Amino acid sequence: MKNLPHKKYQLIILLLLVSLSVSFAQSNIVEMRSKYNSLGKFWVATFEGGVTLPFSDFQTPSIGYTGKAGIEYYFPSRIFLIPGLRLHASYGELNGESNTGRLSGDGSLRRVIKNFNTPFVLLEPSIVAAFGKNKVIPYLALGLDYLLAFIPLEKNGYSLYTNSKRSPFLTFSGEFGIRYFIHNDFSYNFSLKYIKGSVDELDGFVSRKKDAFVMITSGISVHLFRKERIR
């Protein structure tokens, strides 16, 4: 019981230190915005993961996964609009099922396939328009995406085509996202991206419908060279 006052003072000191740390972090954010707004003159390294959903010939689209990383630059800005450029690279998969199935193999190996999977690699250069001067920054992005590689597969990992390597192609994308400043050095991101269909073979089925898909991701961004932008 004799140590209770000392513990009380220690707790008060700890709370004061935490309060000072929070206040210092907040003051850093204010200082960081004193010359440019939240993202102006920023180099950013982004790392995100999430899910995909195809809009294709699959009768029952399924959730797949994706992960991406990239570098971004936002131009100096003191106004509400912050223009930027970025280059992301993604790896992921598109999943789906067919009620009628697709025949594969010959002779005794001939079978009906109903579950499908398409892994892909995507290179994503785009222009970005971010909005705001506070810690919550919504943004829009338009991209000219390059699908470097994709292989439509059945559930056992066998290619649906004799020549498993498909030709790469260009397509367009649109994205909406929100970036939240956790700290001067980090931000949390959430985004919804639509990749326009340009070919009809992402899912292994050929029809008159171009195959498109959606990516929903979240992750963190690391703000690089931050000290160079404050003053």
Image (cartoon, rainbow, N blue to C red):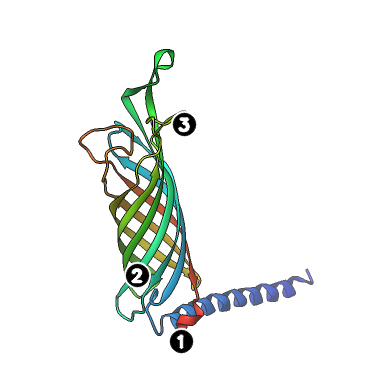
Residue ID for mark 3: 157
The picture places residue 122, in percent across and down from the top left corner, at 39, 51
Position of 222 with respect to 172 (left or right) is: right
What number is the disc on residue 231?
1
Q: Residues within 10 Å of mark 3 (few under 14, many from 20)?
A: few
| C-alpha separation, residue under disc 2 versus residue under disc 1 | 20 Å
For the residue marked with disc 2, what is the amino acid? Gly
The residue lying at 40 percent from left, 35 percent from top is 164
Do the residues bearing badges 3 and 2 touch, measured as CB atoms within 8 Å? no
Name the residue furthest front: 163
Give above or below for 13 relative to 146: below
Badge 1 marks a residue whose secondary structure is loop
- Quadrant of the rendered structure where residue 175 is? bottom left
Whole-percent x and y of residue 108?
43, 12
Q: Is residue 133 above or below residue 217?
A: below
Which comes before the other along the chain, label 3 or label 1? 3
Foreground of the two, 181 or 200: 200
- The residue depicted at 20 percent of the width and 36 percent of the height is 208
Disc 3 and disc 2: Cα gap in Å?
39 Å
Foreground mark, 2 or 1? 2
**Residue most extreme to the bottom:** 231
Q: Which residue is mark 2?
A: 84
Residue 57, image x, y percentages:
27, 34
What SS does tag 2 mark? Answer: strand
Which amino acid type is marked by label 1? Arg
**Quadrant in which the N terminus is drawn:** bottom right
Tell me the amino acid under the disc marked 3. Answer: Gly
